[in-house]
Image (cartoon, helix red, strand yellow):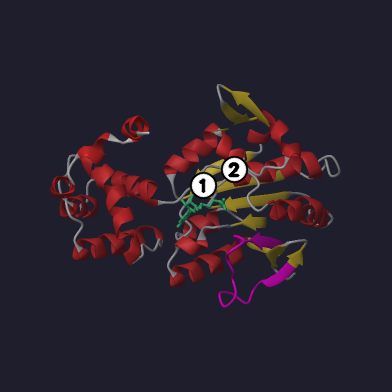
Amino acid sequence: MSVLLLRFTPPDAFIPFAEAATQEPPLRLQTFARLRDFIYQLSGLFVADTHRYFLKVRLLRRMQLLGLRSFEEYLDYITGATPQTVQEHQELLNSIVVVETHFFRTPEHFAALGRQILPELASKRGRLRLWSAGCATGEEAYSMAMVVHRDFHPVFPHIPVEILGTDLSSEAIARAQRGRYRAPSLHGMPEVYKGYLREVWGEYEVVPEIRSVVRFQLLNLVDEDSVRAVGPVDVLFCRNVLLYLAPEVRRRVVEALCEQLLPGGYLFVGAAETLSHMTDRLQLVHFPRALAYWKPE
Ligand SMILES: C[S@@+](CC[C@H](N)C(=O)[O-])C[C@H]1O[C@@H](n2cnc3c(N)ncnc32)[C@H](O)[C@@H]1O
């Protein structure tokens, strides 16, 4: 038993606690507050007081890479006006966002999309545009494409469908474009769609016919001009994104998304999220074991 314990104990655990504490620069309350404001201005993301340690751990890695010794130095670095500073803004966001996702997360949403929403919209439009806003590493957008390929196009082959995946994290977008995933991304994925992934060296790669219909792009939802540039969409998934934004930013983002949604279009938020008290431009609609918001025509 003790052998096992020794084997799995990481080397850092042998550093006495007091010594380890002196090796790590402190993240003072005032510096934390300034960093938090800076992140809020950049992205609308809200870092709660309770996440001070989380922020510290994530930023320590950046500081080590940049050779900076204190959080105050890091703050000066990111608020400076050099081209490297702007690059660091993206690295900072990449290091703090939560990009957790998987294929067919909340499968009821995809069932509603394939069985009801797409056929209904096809009877009204000559082409369809779907947007996964806050797509993280891309599984959500690819899941949409699988539904289109397997359930929609065999019945409506003449309706072209365009799918866009966007995210704040450039790292997540690069991974989405690569289209290769580890086994946990497939957790809970309906068997019938697994044929759209092929195993390559222990990973799962999205097949070309699915990859070719999805386009990924870096986009900050807080930037209203960028949201407008996406153009009108029929179906919008913005799931498990709004909960990370400060409440007043959330409202503005929802307004901007509503603008892009075509009349008769649908918006999905995460299973634990709601738009109540945020907009009166959308109506809540019920699907089997799923809710969505509909923009009246
Ligand atoms: C938990 S993931 C959700 C992924 C996927 N939508 C899902 O439900 O599985 C949240 C994503 O929101 C993105 N995000 C957070 N704030 C954003 C912003 N201001 N603009 C664009 N994306 C943002 C993060 O980068 C992250 O990839």
Q: Where residue 65 appears, x then y in whole percent? A: 24, 38
Residue at left offset 53%, top offset 38%: 176
Residue 209: name its quadrant: top right
Note whether ligand 1 is within 8 Å of mark 2.
yes
Location of mark 1 (residue): 136
Q: Is residue 6 above or below residue 287?
A: above
Residue at left offset 34%, top offset 45%: 91
What kind of secondary structure does the magenta stretch mostly adopt? loop
Residue at left offset 60%, top offset 29%: 205
Q: Which residues are magenta?
A: 265-285
- 208 on left or right of 248: right
Can you see residue 212? no
- 252 on left or right of 38: right
Residue 150: name its quadrant: top right
Residue at left offset 55%, top offset 47%: 101
- 184 on left or right of 248: right
Q: Where residue 136 appears, x then y in whole percent? A: 51, 47
Q: Residue furthest front?
A: 1
Location of mark 2 (residue): 139
Tell me the crowding category of disc 1: few under 14, some 14 to 19, or many 20 or more residues within 10 angstroms, Cα based.
Answer: many
Can you see residue 166? yes
Name the kind of residue labelled 1 in the image.
Ala
C-beta proximity under 8 Å, tags 2 and 1: yes
Note whether ligand 1 is within 8 Å of mark 1.
yes
Could you tell me which secondary element the residue under label 1 belongs to?
A: loop
Q: Nearer the viewer, residue 117 or 281?
A: 117
Q: Is residue 193 above or below residue 56?
A: above
Report, in whole angstroms, how far the alpha carbon at label 2 lies from the one at label 1.
8 Å
Name the kind of residue labelled 2 in the image.
Glu
